[in-house]
Amino acid sequence: MYNELYEIGRQVTALVTEQMTEVTAEEVGLDRRAAYRLYVSEDTIAVSKDADRTLQYYGGFEYVDKEYRQEMGDWVFYFADDERIGDHLAQYFEGDDYYDDEDRAAEEA
């Protein structure tokens, strides 16, 4: 059983790293402390399990409803059906300006 589970985990990692796009937290409109490396697809944000805690804390992902969060292998997946996740994906894929002028001014201060 161990070998089969190990292989599934390896396949999940391969899927993430080969079929998703590696981005920085800032590219999806997050505080740079939220994650060193994220992976995105049109409907998903993936982060390694060991980086999930900072993503939740600095990225606000602790507010994502559990039904839109899935752990698999060494990865945590967040799905765009959650408004917060959808907004961050739109920031990256559509260039939507997630932050408004007040947020930008606060960051510059």
Image (tube, rainbow, N blue to C red):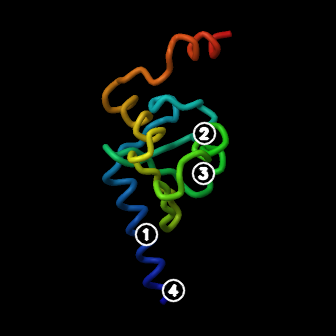
Q: Which residue is mark 4?
A: 2
The x and y percentages for residue 48 are 54, 55
User: Could you give the CA–CA distance between mark 3 and mark 2, rounded to whole angstroms?
Assistant: 11 Å
Return the disc, 4 or 3, that comes first in the chain's sequence: 4
Q: Which mark is residue 60?
A: 2
Determine the secondary structure under disc 1.
helix
The x and y percentages for residue 34 are 60, 38
Q: Is residue 84 above or below residue 3?
A: above
The x and y percentages for residue 89 are 39, 37
**Given contact means CB atoms under 8 Å apart, are the residues at marks 4 and 3 in contact?**
no
Viewer-nearest residue: 50 or 30: 30
The x and y percentages for residue 44 are 39, 48
Viewer-nearest residue: 6 or 91: 91
Determine the secondary structure under disc 3.
helix
Q: Which residue is mark 1?
A: 10
Q: Amino acid at mark 4?
A: Tyr
Q: Is residue 25 above or below residue 42?
A: above
Q: Amino acid at mark 1?
A: Arg
Q: Amino acid at mark 2?
A: Gly
Q: Which residue is mark 3?
A: 52
Q: How would you rate the neighbour count of disc 4 (Cα within 10 Å): few for under 14, some for 14-19, many for 20 or more?
A: few
Name the side, left or right, on which 62 lies relative to 41. right
Viewer-nearest residue: 44 or 26: 44
Q: Amino acid at mark 3?
A: Asp
Return the disc, 3 or 2, that comes first in the chain's sequence: 3
